[in-house]
Amino acid sequence: MKLLTAFLCLGVFGRLFGAEPKDSFTFIDDYLAKWNRFAQGDESLVPFLRDNTEKFEVSLAAALRAGDNRAVSRVVFYTVVQVGGFIDIESPLGKEVTKVFGQLPVTKGKKGEKLIFAGDLYFWWKQKHAEYPAFSQYDEWEKTDFAREVPIPMYEKIHAQPKKEG
């Protein structure tokens, strides 16, 4: 019983004094690295990504809620690496994104859901990136031929179109 009490106290102590955020960012960054590898063709990562999406989004939302500015670049990277990804504003992650990122355009999805599109986050990041810690995975991705030839031009083309009222 004393051993159980000691482990419980250590767990509470670790959460109070910072052990959890480090572990969360290790998982967050690992998940994003795997998404990037999947986007480059490694289909063996599909089961991991599928099985860990909820844990990832909950962890990222918690980091935003805690005010950890490192989470901001990870949100942007999460959507852009998916080439046209989005975040549902009614999801736990979406609710935190709207609090931290402020007013962003919202797109209506096929099922009527309200979505924040990767391209809008991409341009938000282009304007605000100096205010937040850099994320090396994002910086490396942005320099790849693939990013410069596929998603970035797609985001630029969509961004240049007049917004529909509605």
Image (spheres, grey):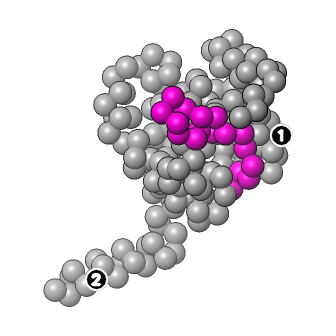
Is the residue marked by circle 1 packed among few (<14), some (14-19), or many (20+) residues within 10 Å?
few
* Residue 100, image quadrant: bottom right
Residue 81 vs residue 90, the one in the foreground: 90
Residue under the image location 58 percent in, 62 percent down:
65
Q: Secondary structure at mark 1?
A: helix
Find residue 57 and report its horizontal and vertical position in percent.
Answer: 47, 48
* Amino acid type of the residue tagged 2 in the rendering: Ala
* Amino acid type of the residue tagged 1 in the rendering: Gln
Find residue 31 and report its horizontal and vertical position in percent.
Answer: 45, 39
Residue 72 vs residue 166, the one in the foreground: 166
The boundaries of the magenta stretch are: 100-116
Mark 2 and mark 1 lie on one chain; the one further toward the N terminus is: 2
Membership of 108 in magenta stretch: yes
Q: CA distance from mark 2 to mark 1?
A: 48 Å
Q: Which mark is residue 103?
A: none
Residue under the image location 65 percent in, 14 percent down:
150
Quadrant containing the N terminus is bottom left
Please give the residue where the numbered disc 2 appears in the rendered image: 6
Residue 33 can be seen, yes or no = no
Is the residue marked by circle 2 packed among few (<14), some (14-19), or many (20+) residues within 10 Å?
few
Find residue 24 and report its horizontal and vertical position in percent.
Answer: 47, 55
Residue under the image location 66 percent in, 44 percent down:
73
Membership of 87 in magenta stretch: no
Q: Establish if 135 lies above or below 15.
A: above
Please give the residue where the numbered disc 1 appears in the rendered image: 127
Find residue 84 and report its horizontal and vertical position in percent.
Answer: 59, 25
Residue 89 can be seen, yes or no = yes
Residue 29 vs residue 3, the one in the foreground: 29
Q: Secondary structure at mark 2?
A: helix
Q: Establish if 98 lies above or below 119.
A: below
Foreground disc of the pair 2, 1: 1
